Amino acid sequence: VNVDTSVVAEALASALGPERVSVEPRDLAAASRDESDLPPVAPACVCRPASAADVAAVVRVAFDNRVPVTARGGGSSLEGSSIPAPGAIVVDFAAMDRVIEVSTEDRLAVVQPGVVFDRLNASLRPTGLFFPPSPGGSGDVATIGGMVSTDASGLYALRYGGTRRWVLGLEVVTGRGEVLRLGGRVPKSSSGYGLRDLVVGSEGTLALVTEVTLGIAPVPAASARVALAFDDLAGACETAAEAAAFVPELAAVELVDRDTLDALRRLPGFGDVPACHALFAETHGRPGECEAGLDAVRAVARERGGREVAAGADPWDLRHRVTRTVRESAGTAGVARTDCAVPLTRLAAFVAEVSSAAAGRRTHVFGHVGLGIVHCLMPLGGPAAWTREDACAMKARLAALAVAMGGVVSGEHGIGLAMRGALRDAGPAQVELMRAVKAAFDPAGILNPDKILGQR
Ligand SMILES: Cc1cc2nc3c(=O)[nH]c(=O)nc-3n(C[C@H](O)[C@H](O)[C@H](O)COP(=O)(O)OP(=O)(O)OC[C@H]3O[C@@H](n4cnc5c(N)ncnc54)[C@H](O)[C@@H]3O)c2cc1C
Protein backbone atom coordinates (compact mmCIF):
# COMPACT_ATOMS: atom_id res chain seq x y z
CA VAL A 1 0.00 0.00 0.00
CA ASN A 2 1.52 3.28 -1.05
CA VAL A 3 -0.66 5.87 0.66
CA ASP A 4 0.09 8.79 2.96
CA THR A 5 -1.20 7.46 6.28
CA SER A 6 -1.66 10.92 7.76
CA VAL A 7 -3.97 11.91 4.87
CA VAL A 8 -6.12 8.82 5.54
CA ALA A 9 -6.14 9.41 9.32
CA GLU A 10 -7.18 13.03 8.77
CA ALA A 11 -10.00 12.02 6.41
CA LEU A 12 -11.21 9.48 9.00
CA ALA A 13 -10.98 11.99 11.83
CA SER A 14 -13.07 14.49 9.91
CA ALA A 15 -15.66 11.79 9.05
CA LEU A 16 -15.96 10.26 12.57
CA GLY A 17 -14.60 12.92 14.88
CA PRO A 18 -10.98 12.85 16.06
CA GLU A 19 -11.82 11.04 19.32
CA ARG A 20 -12.83 7.96 17.31
CA VAL A 21 -9.54 7.62 15.38
CA SER A 22 -6.20 6.70 16.95
CA VAL A 23 -2.64 6.46 15.70
CA GLU A 24 -1.29 6.08 19.26
CA PRO A 25 1.45 3.38 19.32
CA ARG A 26 -0.29 1.68 22.28
CA ASP A 27 -3.57 1.35 20.33
CA LEU A 28 -1.77 0.19 17.18
CA ALA A 29 0.12 -2.47 19.18
CA ALA A 30 -3.10 -3.71 20.87
CA ALA A 31 -4.78 -4.09 17.46
CA SER A 32 -1.78 -5.78 15.83
CA ARG A 33 -2.34 -9.33 17.05
CA ASP A 34 -4.94 -11.97 17.78
CA GLU A 35 -4.82 -15.15 19.89
CA SER A 36 -2.82 -17.09 17.32
CA ASP A 37 0.95 -17.12 17.64
CA LEU A 38 1.48 -15.55 14.25
CA PRO A 39 3.65 -12.42 14.04
CA PRO A 40 1.83 -9.14 14.79
CA VAL A 41 1.26 -6.55 12.06
CA ALA A 42 0.77 -2.94 13.18
CA PRO A 43 -2.11 -1.17 11.39
CA ALA A 44 -1.95 2.41 10.10
CA CYS A 45 -4.71 3.52 12.50
CA VAL A 46 -7.57 2.25 14.63
CA CYS A 47 -11.16 3.57 14.30
CA ARG A 48 -13.93 3.04 16.83
CA PRO A 49 -17.19 3.72 14.96
CA ALA A 50 -20.45 4.29 16.83
CA SER A 51 -22.92 3.48 14.03
CA ALA A 52 -23.37 1.86 10.61
CA ALA A 53 -23.06 5.35 9.10
CA ASP A 54 -19.62 5.70 10.73
CA VAL A 55 -18.56 2.30 9.39
CA ALA A 56 -19.75 3.23 5.89
CA ALA A 57 -17.77 6.50 6.11
CA VAL A 58 -14.61 4.56 7.06
CA VAL A 59 -15.05 2.14 4.17
CA ARG A 60 -15.62 5.00 1.71
CA VAL A 61 -12.35 6.66 2.81
CA ALA A 62 -10.61 3.30 2.45
CA PHE A 63 -12.21 2.73 -0.98
CA ASP A 64 -11.18 6.17 -2.27
CA ASN A 65 -7.61 5.71 -1.03
CA ARG A 66 -7.36 1.98 -1.75
CA VAL A 67 -6.37 1.22 1.85
CA PRO A 68 -7.17 -2.18 3.43
CA VAL A 69 -9.68 -2.46 6.28
CA THR A 70 -9.57 -5.17 8.96
CA ALA A 71 -12.57 -5.53 11.28
CA ARG A 72 -11.87 -6.34 14.92
CA GLY A 73 -14.17 -7.72 17.61
CA GLY A 74 -12.56 -9.34 20.67
CA GLY A 75 -9.38 -10.24 18.77
CA SER A 76 -9.70 -13.87 19.94
CA SER A 77 -9.26 -15.45 16.51
CA LEU A 78 -6.88 -18.42 16.58
CA GLU A 79 -5.78 -18.43 12.93
CA GLY A 80 -4.72 -14.82 12.28
CA SER A 81 -8.11 -13.64 10.93
CA SER A 82 -8.05 -10.42 12.96
CA ILE A 83 -4.36 -9.61 12.48
CA PRO A 84 -4.51 -6.42 10.37
CA ALA A 85 -3.60 -6.52 6.71
CA PRO A 86 -0.37 -4.54 6.23
CA GLY A 87 -1.11 -0.77 6.38
CA ALA A 88 -4.77 -1.39 7.28
CA ILE A 89 -7.35 0.74 8.99
CA VAL A 90 -8.60 -1.39 11.88
CA VAL A 91 -12.32 -1.01 12.55
CA ASP A 92 -12.67 -1.88 16.22
CA PHE A 93 -16.33 -2.58 17.09
CA ALA A 94 -15.92 -2.18 20.87
CA ALA A 95 -18.08 0.97 20.94
CA MET A 96 -20.96 -0.73 19.06
CA ASP A 97 -21.96 -2.99 21.95
CA ARG A 98 -25.68 -2.42 22.51
CA VAL A 99 -28.38 -5.08 22.76
CA ILE A 100 -30.94 -3.14 20.71
CA GLU A 101 -34.03 -5.33 21.10
CA VAL A 102 -35.10 -8.63 22.63
CA SER A 103 -38.40 -10.02 21.33
CA THR A 104 -39.64 -13.01 23.32
CA GLU A 105 -42.64 -13.22 20.92
CA ASP A 106 -40.49 -13.47 17.78
CA ARG A 107 -37.76 -15.30 19.73
CA LEU A 108 -34.99 -13.03 18.53
CA ALA A 109 -32.46 -10.49 19.69
CA VAL A 110 -31.15 -7.57 17.63
CA VAL A 111 -27.62 -6.63 18.65
CA GLN A 112 -24.70 -4.49 17.60
CA PRO A 113 -21.65 -6.52 16.56
CA GLY A 114 -19.46 -5.55 19.52
CA VAL A 115 -21.69 -7.28 22.11
CA VAL A 116 -19.66 -9.95 23.92
CA PHE A 117 -21.17 -13.46 23.91
CA ASP A 118 -21.27 -13.91 27.72
CA ARG A 119 -22.86 -10.47 28.17
CA LEU A 120 -25.58 -11.24 25.62
CA ASN A 121 -26.54 -14.44 27.43
CA ALA A 122 -26.39 -12.71 30.83
CA SER A 123 -28.80 -10.06 29.55
CA LEU A 124 -31.14 -12.72 28.10
CA ARG A 125 -31.30 -14.73 31.35
CA PRO A 126 -34.47 -13.07 32.75
CA THR A 127 -36.36 -14.02 29.57
CA GLY A 128 -35.64 -17.77 29.88
CA LEU A 129 -34.14 -17.67 26.37
CA PHE A 130 -30.51 -17.92 25.27
CA PHE A 131 -28.20 -17.72 22.25
CA PRO A 132 -26.87 -21.29 22.16
CA PRO A 133 -23.65 -21.53 20.09
CA SER A 134 -21.11 -20.97 22.88
CA PRO A 135 -17.58 -20.21 21.66
CA GLY A 136 -16.04 -22.40 24.39
CA GLY A 137 -13.27 -20.79 26.42
CA SER A 138 -13.49 -17.39 24.70
CA GLY A 139 -17.08 -16.50 25.66
CA ASP A 140 -15.76 -13.71 27.89
CA VAL A 141 -14.15 -11.87 24.93
CA ALA A 142 -15.64 -13.14 21.63
CA THR A 143 -18.13 -10.68 20.13
CA ILE A 144 -21.26 -11.50 18.15
CA GLY A 145 -19.69 -9.80 15.08
CA GLY A 146 -16.61 -12.01 15.41
CA MET A 147 -18.73 -15.13 15.95
CA VAL A 148 -20.84 -14.36 12.88
CA SER A 149 -17.72 -13.68 10.82
CA THR A 150 -16.07 -17.00 11.77
CA ASP A 151 -19.33 -18.99 12.07
CA ALA A 152 -18.15 -19.90 15.56
CA SER A 153 -19.46 -22.98 17.31
CA GLY A 154 -18.71 -24.66 20.57
CA LEU A 155 -19.88 -27.03 23.25
CA TYR A 156 -23.57 -27.02 22.42
CA ALA A 157 -23.32 -26.95 18.63
CA LEU A 158 -24.01 -30.69 18.60
CA ARG A 159 -27.61 -30.02 19.61
CA TYR A 160 -28.13 -26.43 18.49
CA GLY A 161 -25.77 -25.97 15.53
CA GLY A 162 -23.20 -23.23 15.01
CA THR A 163 -23.71 -19.47 14.76
CA ARG A 164 -24.98 -19.61 11.15
CA ARG A 165 -28.12 -21.49 12.19
CA TRP A 166 -29.13 -18.57 14.47
CA VAL A 167 -28.37 -15.63 12.17
CA LEU A 168 -31.70 -14.41 10.81
CA GLY A 169 -30.66 -11.04 9.47
CA LEU A 170 -27.61 -8.85 9.05
CA GLU A 171 -26.98 -5.20 8.40
CA VAL A 172 -23.67 -4.94 6.56
CA VAL A 173 -21.41 -2.42 4.87
CA THR A 174 -19.95 -3.71 1.60
CA GLY A 175 -16.51 -2.91 0.20
CA ARG A 176 -18.04 0.05 -1.68
CA GLY A 177 -19.40 1.55 1.53
CA GLU A 178 -23.08 0.67 0.82
CA VAL A 179 -25.24 -0.23 3.85
CA LEU A 180 -27.39 -3.31 3.06
CA ARG A 181 -29.86 -5.47 4.97
CA LEU A 182 -29.54 -9.22 4.27
CA GLY A 183 -32.13 -11.72 5.51
CA GLY A 184 -34.73 -10.48 7.99
CA ARG A 185 -36.52 -11.50 11.21
CA VAL A 186 -37.69 -14.92 10.01
CA PRO A 187 -35.96 -18.29 10.34
CA LYS A 188 -36.53 -19.47 6.75
CA SER A 189 -36.17 -17.84 3.34
CA SER A 190 -36.27 -18.93 -0.31
CA SER A 191 -35.58 -15.47 -1.66
CA GLY A 192 -32.80 -15.76 -4.19
CA TYR A 193 -29.12 -16.20 -3.46
CA GLY A 194 -28.20 -16.60 0.23
CA LEU A 195 -26.24 -13.35 0.58
CA ARG A 196 -26.61 -13.37 4.36
CA ASP A 197 -25.08 -16.83 4.50
CA LEU A 198 -22.15 -15.76 2.32
CA VAL A 199 -21.25 -13.09 4.87
CA VAL A 200 -21.46 -15.57 7.78
CA GLY A 201 -18.00 -17.14 8.07
CA SER A 202 -16.36 -14.70 5.64
CA GLU A 203 -13.92 -13.29 8.26
CA GLY A 204 -14.50 -9.66 7.34
CA THR A 205 -13.48 -10.23 3.69
CA LEU A 206 -16.88 -9.55 2.07
CA ALA A 207 -18.56 -6.95 4.29
CA LEU A 208 -18.45 -5.41 7.75
CA VAL A 209 -21.34 -6.49 9.98
CA THR A 210 -22.98 -3.55 11.76
CA GLU A 211 -26.11 -5.23 13.22
CA VAL A 212 -27.17 -8.84 13.79
CA THR A 213 -30.66 -10.29 14.25
CA LEU A 214 -30.22 -13.57 16.11
CA GLY A 215 -32.70 -16.32 16.84
CA ILE A 216 -32.75 -17.35 20.51
CA ALA A 217 -33.93 -20.59 22.11
CA PRO A 218 -35.64 -21.57 25.38
CA VAL A 219 -33.19 -22.56 28.10
CA PRO A 220 -33.67 -26.34 28.51
CA ALA A 221 -35.90 -27.40 31.40
CA ALA A 222 -33.11 -29.57 32.76
CA SER A 223 -29.59 -30.69 32.01
CA ALA A 224 -27.30 -33.41 33.33
CA ARG A 225 -23.59 -34.12 33.01
CA VAL A 226 -21.21 -37.03 33.22
CA ALA A 227 -17.41 -37.38 33.10
CA LEU A 228 -16.05 -40.63 31.62
CA ALA A 229 -12.49 -41.95 31.75
CA PHE A 230 -10.80 -44.17 29.16
CA ASP A 231 -7.34 -45.78 29.05
CA ASP A 232 -7.63 -45.98 25.31
CA LEU A 233 -8.17 -42.94 23.06
CA ALA A 234 -9.96 -45.03 20.41
CA GLY A 235 -12.55 -46.12 23.00
CA ALA A 236 -13.26 -42.50 23.89
CA CYS A 237 -13.66 -41.51 20.22
CA GLU A 238 -15.92 -44.46 19.41
CA THR A 239 -18.10 -43.67 22.44
CA ALA A 240 -18.42 -40.02 21.41
CA ALA A 241 -19.29 -40.95 17.82
CA GLU A 242 -21.89 -43.55 18.77
CA ALA A 243 -23.47 -41.39 21.47
CA ALA A 244 -23.65 -38.35 19.14
CA ALA A 245 -25.36 -40.44 16.49
CA PHE A 246 -27.85 -42.29 18.69
CA VAL A 247 -28.55 -40.31 21.89
CA PRO A 248 -30.94 -37.52 20.91
CA GLU A 249 -30.78 -35.79 24.31
CA LEU A 250 -27.03 -35.24 23.96
CA ALA A 251 -26.21 -31.51 23.79
CA ALA A 252 -22.43 -31.71 24.13
CA VAL A 253 -19.72 -34.34 24.12
CA GLU A 254 -16.16 -33.13 24.53
CA LEU A 255 -12.89 -35.06 24.35
CA VAL A 256 -9.87 -34.05 26.43
CA ASP A 257 -6.90 -36.39 25.97
CA ARG A 258 -4.48 -37.54 28.66
CA ASP A 259 -1.66 -35.11 27.78
CA THR A 260 -4.10 -32.22 27.97
CA LEU A 261 -5.46 -33.33 31.36
CA ASP A 262 -1.83 -33.62 32.56
CA ALA A 263 -1.29 -29.97 31.63
CA LEU A 264 -4.51 -28.92 33.43
CA ARG A 265 -3.62 -30.85 36.59
CA ARG A 266 -0.91 -28.28 37.33
CA LEU A 267 -3.53 -25.53 37.76
CA PRO A 268 -4.46 -24.57 41.35
CA GLY A 269 -7.60 -26.48 42.38
CA PHE A 270 -7.22 -29.05 39.60
CA GLY A 271 -4.72 -31.37 41.37
CA ASP A 272 -7.08 -34.38 41.50
CA VAL A 273 -7.96 -34.42 37.77
CA PRO A 274 -7.70 -38.14 36.84
CA ALA A 275 -4.93 -39.52 34.61
CA CYS A 276 -6.90 -40.77 31.59
CA HIS A 277 -8.45 -39.73 28.30
CA ALA A 278 -11.76 -38.07 29.23
CA LEU A 279 -15.15 -37.47 27.65
CA PHE A 280 -17.48 -34.91 29.18
CA ALA A 281 -21.11 -35.26 28.10
CA GLU A 282 -24.18 -33.11 28.77
CA THR A 283 -27.81 -33.85 27.99
CA HIS A 284 -30.67 -31.35 27.70
CA GLY A 285 -34.41 -31.97 27.95
CA ARG A 286 -36.94 -32.75 30.66
CA PRO A 287 -35.43 -34.13 33.92
CA GLY A 288 -36.22 -37.80 33.21
CA GLU A 289 -35.04 -37.56 29.62
CA CYS A 290 -31.69 -36.09 30.68
CA GLU A 291 -30.89 -38.99 33.00
CA ALA A 292 -32.08 -41.55 30.42
CA GLY A 293 -29.80 -39.92 27.84
CA LEU A 294 -26.83 -40.05 30.19
CA ASP A 295 -27.54 -43.73 30.97
CA ALA A 296 -27.40 -44.44 27.24
CA VAL A 297 -24.03 -42.66 27.03
CA ARG A 298 -22.74 -44.58 30.07
CA ALA A 299 -23.81 -47.88 28.47
CA VAL A 300 -21.96 -47.11 25.23
CA ALA A 301 -18.88 -46.05 27.24
CA ARG A 302 -18.85 -49.29 29.25
CA GLU A 303 -18.82 -51.33 26.04
CA ARG A 304 -15.78 -49.31 24.89
CA GLY A 305 -13.78 -49.65 28.12
CA GLY A 306 -14.91 -46.39 29.75
CA ARG A 307 -15.83 -45.76 33.39
CA GLU A 308 -17.56 -42.89 35.15
CA VAL A 309 -15.30 -40.67 37.26
CA ALA A 310 -15.47 -37.54 39.35
CA ALA A 311 -13.75 -35.01 37.09
CA GLY A 312 -11.97 -33.47 40.08
CA ALA A 313 -13.35 -30.07 38.98
CA ASP A 314 -16.28 -28.70 37.00
CA PRO A 315 -15.76 -30.46 33.65
CA TRP A 316 -16.79 -27.42 31.63
CA ASP A 317 -14.52 -25.13 33.63
CA LEU A 318 -11.73 -27.61 32.96
CA ARG A 319 -12.61 -27.76 29.26
CA HIS A 320 -12.74 -23.97 28.97
CA ARG A 321 -9.20 -23.63 30.30
CA VAL A 322 -7.58 -26.04 27.84
CA THR A 323 -6.55 -23.65 25.06
CA ARG A 324 -5.05 -21.00 27.33
CA THR A 325 -3.33 -23.53 29.66
CA VAL A 326 -1.62 -25.46 26.86
CA ARG A 327 -0.54 -22.20 25.28
CA GLU A 328 1.00 -21.05 28.57
CA SER A 329 2.87 -24.36 28.83
CA ALA A 330 4.66 -23.50 25.59
CA GLY A 331 6.07 -20.25 26.99
CA THR A 332 6.72 -17.38 24.60
CA ALA A 333 7.21 -19.75 21.64
CA GLY A 334 3.42 -20.32 21.50
CA VAL A 335 1.51 -23.13 19.80
CA ALA A 336 0.35 -24.20 16.34
CA ARG A 337 -3.07 -25.80 16.01
CA THR A 338 -5.55 -27.57 13.77
CA ASP A 339 -9.34 -27.65 13.99
CA CYS A 340 -10.31 -30.09 11.25
CA ALA A 341 -13.73 -31.76 11.26
CA VAL A 342 -14.34 -35.35 10.13
CA PRO A 343 -17.45 -37.54 9.86
CA LEU A 344 -18.22 -39.38 13.11
CA THR A 345 -17.45 -42.75 11.55
CA ARG A 346 -13.87 -41.58 10.85
CA LEU A 347 -13.23 -39.87 14.18
CA ALA A 348 -11.25 -42.70 15.84
CA ALA A 349 -9.14 -43.26 12.70
CA PHE A 350 -8.39 -39.55 12.39
CA VAL A 351 -7.33 -39.24 16.04
CA ALA A 352 -5.18 -42.39 15.72
CA GLU A 353 -3.42 -40.78 12.78
CA VAL A 354 -2.78 -37.61 14.82
CA SER A 355 -1.13 -39.70 17.54
CA SER A 356 1.05 -41.64 15.14
CA ALA A 357 2.09 -38.57 13.11
CA ALA A 358 3.00 -36.76 16.36
CA ALA A 359 5.87 -39.27 16.72
CA GLY A 360 6.63 -38.48 20.36
CA ARG A 361 6.27 -34.69 20.08
CA ARG A 362 3.93 -33.22 22.72
CA THR A 363 0.50 -33.04 21.08
CA HIS A 364 -2.74 -32.12 22.83
CA VAL A 365 -5.89 -33.56 21.31
CA PHE A 366 -9.34 -32.34 22.39
CA GLY A 367 -12.47 -30.89 20.84
CA HIS A 368 -16.17 -30.90 20.14
CA VAL A 369 -15.95 -34.51 19.00
CA GLY A 370 -19.71 -34.98 18.86
CA LEU A 371 -19.50 -32.78 15.76
CA GLY A 372 -16.33 -34.49 14.55
CA ILE A 373 -14.26 -31.36 15.39
CA VAL A 374 -10.77 -32.32 16.57
CA HIS A 375 -8.38 -29.69 17.91
CA CYS A 376 -4.74 -30.61 17.95
CA LEU A 377 -2.40 -28.19 19.74
CA MET A 378 1.32 -28.44 19.01
CA PRO A 379 3.48 -26.51 21.54
CA LEU A 380 6.41 -24.75 19.87
CA GLY A 381 8.26 -24.46 23.21
CA GLY A 382 8.69 -26.51 26.41
CA PRO A 383 9.41 -30.26 26.62
CA ALA A 384 9.09 -32.39 23.42
CA ALA A 385 8.17 -29.25 21.44
CA TRP A 386 7.45 -29.04 17.72
CA THR A 387 9.51 -26.94 15.32
CA ARG A 388 7.34 -24.40 13.48
CA GLU A 389 8.22 -26.11 10.21
CA ASP A 390 7.13 -29.56 11.42
CA ALA A 391 3.94 -28.12 12.92
CA CYS A 392 3.05 -26.44 9.60
CA ALA A 393 3.66 -29.73 7.78
CA MET A 394 1.38 -31.47 10.33
CA LYS A 395 -1.36 -28.88 9.77
CA ALA A 396 -1.23 -29.52 6.02
CA ARG A 397 -1.13 -33.29 6.51
CA LEU A 398 -4.12 -33.39 8.87
CA ALA A 399 -6.17 -31.01 6.73
CA ALA A 400 -5.57 -33.21 3.68
CA LEU A 401 -6.46 -36.32 5.66
CA ALA A 402 -9.67 -34.73 6.98
CA VAL A 403 -10.73 -33.75 3.45
CA ALA A 404 -9.92 -37.23 2.13
CA MET A 405 -12.17 -38.64 4.88
CA GLY A 406 -15.06 -36.41 3.80
CA GLY A 407 -14.35 -33.67 6.33
CA VAL A 408 -13.19 -30.04 6.15
CA VAL A 409 -9.98 -28.15 6.92
CA SER A 410 -11.58 -25.94 9.62
CA GLY A 411 -14.61 -26.89 11.68
CA GLU A 412 -14.89 -23.59 13.55
CA HIS A 413 -11.80 -21.35 13.84
CA GLY A 414 -11.78 -20.27 10.21
CA ILE A 415 -9.02 -19.98 7.61
CA GLY A 416 -7.41 -16.62 8.47
CA LEU A 417 -3.76 -16.56 7.45
CA ALA A 418 -2.67 -19.92 8.77
CA MET A 419 -5.01 -22.29 6.87
CA ARG A 420 -4.98 -20.62 3.43
CA GLY A 421 -2.69 -23.23 1.87
CA ALA A 422 -4.83 -26.08 3.19
CA LEU A 423 -8.01 -24.48 1.81
CA ARG A 424 -6.43 -24.02 -1.61
CA ASP A 425 -5.09 -27.59 -1.64
CA ALA A 426 -8.57 -28.87 -0.74
CA GLY A 427 -10.24 -27.13 -3.69
CA PRO A 428 -8.41 -24.67 -5.97
CA ALA A 429 -11.47 -24.16 -8.20
CA GLN A 430 -13.64 -23.45 -5.16
CA VAL A 431 -11.12 -20.83 -3.98
CA GLU A 432 -11.31 -19.15 -7.43
CA LEU A 433 -15.11 -19.04 -7.12
CA MET A 434 -14.73 -17.46 -3.66
CA ARG A 435 -12.44 -14.84 -5.26
CA ALA A 436 -15.22 -13.98 -7.74
CA VAL A 437 -17.73 -13.66 -4.89
CA LYS A 438 -15.32 -11.37 -3.03
CA ALA A 439 -14.93 -9.17 -6.12
CA ALA A 440 -18.73 -8.70 -6.23
CA PHE A 441 -18.93 -7.57 -2.57
CA ASP A 442 -15.59 -5.78 -2.50
CA PRO A 443 -14.50 -4.66 -5.99
CA ALA A 444 -11.41 -2.76 -4.79
CA GLY A 445 -10.26 -5.76 -2.71
CA ILE A 446 -9.85 -3.69 0.48
CA LEU A 447 -11.69 -5.83 3.05
CA ASN A 448 -9.23 -7.98 5.06
CA PRO A 449 -7.59 -8.78 1.69
CA ASP A 450 -4.89 -11.21 2.82
CA LYS A 451 -7.27 -13.59 4.66
CA ILE A 452 -8.85 -16.87 3.47
CA LEU A 453 -7.88 -16.59 -0.22
CA GLY A 454 -4.31 -15.22 -0.17
CA GLN A 455 -2.49 -14.19 -3.35
CA ARG A 456 -3.26 -15.90 -6.63
C1 LIG B 1 -9.37 -19.65 24.64
C2 LIG B 1 -10.09 -19.65 23.31
C3 LIG B 1 -11.06 -20.62 23.05
C4 LIG B 1 -11.75 -20.60 21.84
N1 LIG B 1 -12.72 -21.55 21.65
C5 LIG B 1 -13.47 -21.48 20.52
C6 LIG B 1 -14.54 -22.41 20.32
O1 LIG B 1 -14.83 -23.27 21.12
N2 LIG B 1 -15.26 -22.29 19.17
C7 LIG B 1 -14.98 -21.34 18.23
O2 LIG B 1 -15.68 -21.28 17.22
N3 LIG B 1 -13.96 -20.48 18.39
C8 LIG B 1 -13.20 -20.52 19.50
N4 LIG B 1 -12.17 -19.63 19.66
C9 LIG B 1 -11.86 -18.67 18.59
C10 LIG B 1 -12.56 -17.31 18.68
O3 LIG B 1 -12.94 -17.01 20.00
C11 LIG B 1 -13.78 -17.26 17.76
O4 LIG B 1 -13.38 -17.37 16.41
C12 LIG B 1 -14.63 -15.98 17.93
O5 LIG B 1 -15.79 -16.11 17.15
C13 LIG B 1 -13.90 -14.71 17.49
O6 LIG B 1 -14.63 -13.60 17.96
P1 LIG B 1 -13.90 -12.19 18.16
O7 LIG B 1 -14.92 -11.19 18.51
O8 LIG B 1 -12.74 -12.30 19.07
O9 LIG B 1 -13.40 -11.91 16.67
P2 LIG B 1 -12.03 -11.35 16.14
O10 LIG B 1 -10.90 -12.27 16.48
O11 LIG B 1 -11.87 -9.94 16.50
O12 LIG B 1 -12.31 -11.45 14.56
C14 LIG B 1 -12.48 -12.70 13.94
C15 LIG B 1 -12.76 -12.45 12.45
O13 LIG B 1 -14.01 -11.79 12.30
C16 LIG B 1 -13.84 -10.54 11.65
N5 LIG B 1 -14.78 -9.62 12.30
C17 LIG B 1 -14.89 -9.29 13.61
N6 LIG B 1 -15.93 -8.46 13.80
C18 LIG B 1 -16.48 -8.23 12.56
C19 LIG B 1 -17.56 -7.45 12.08
N7 LIG B 1 -18.33 -6.73 12.90
N8 LIG B 1 -17.81 -7.46 10.75
C20 LIG B 1 -17.06 -8.18 9.89
N9 LIG B 1 -16.02 -8.94 10.29
C21 LIG B 1 -15.75 -8.97 11.61
C22 LIG B 1 -12.37 -10.16 11.85
O14 LIG B 1 -11.91 -9.32 10.82
C23 LIG B 1 -11.73 -11.54 11.77
O15 LIG B 1 -11.59 -11.94 10.44
C24 LIG B 1 -11.45 -19.63 20.86
C25 LIG B 1 -10.46 -18.67 21.13
C26 LIG B 1 -9.79 -18.67 22.33
C27 LIG B 1 -8.75 -17.61 22.58
Image (cartoon, grey):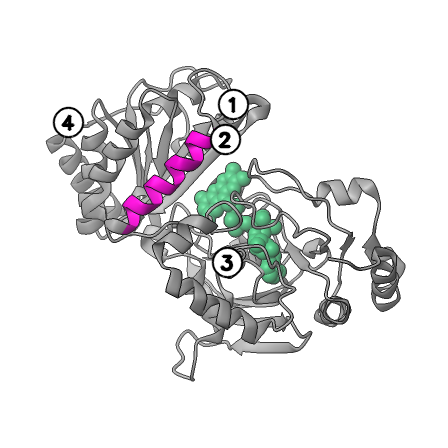
Q: Residue at horizontal 71%, vertical 55%? A: 88
Identify residue for label 4: 305
Task: Rate crowding at label 2 as few (under 14), some (14 to 19) or many (20 or more) other CA atoms within 10 Å.
Answer: many
Tell me the amino acid under the disc marked 2: Val
Task: Give the foreground label among 4 and 1.
Answer: 1
Query: Crowdedness of circle 3 by 10 Å Cα count: few (<14), some, many (20+)?
Result: many
**Residue 320 visible in the picture:** no
Q: Position of residue 43 (x, y in %)?
A: 73, 49
> Mark 3 or mark 2: which is in front?
3
Position of 349 relative to 106 (above/below)? above
Tag 1 secondary structure: loop
Q: Position of residue 331 (x, y in %)?
A: 56, 22
Pick whichever of labels 3 and 1 is earlier in the sequence.
Answer: 1
Give the residues drawn in magenta, as a range: 388-403
SS class, disc 4: loop
Real-space Cα separation, disc 2 to disc 1, in angstroms: 7 Å
The residue that disc 2 covers is 335
Query: How far apart are the two marked residues, 3 and 1, measured between alpha carbons?
Result: 30 Å
- Would you name the residue on which mark 3 appears? 453
Q: Nearer the viewer, residue 115 or 379?
A: 379
Select label 3 or label 1 by which is in front: 3
Tell me the distance, in whole angstroms, between the alpha carbons under discs 2 and 4: 32 Å
User: Which secondary structure lies at badge 2?
Assistant: strand
Q: Which mark is residue 330?
A: 1
Q: Which sits earlier in the primary sequence, circle 3 or circle 2?
A: 2
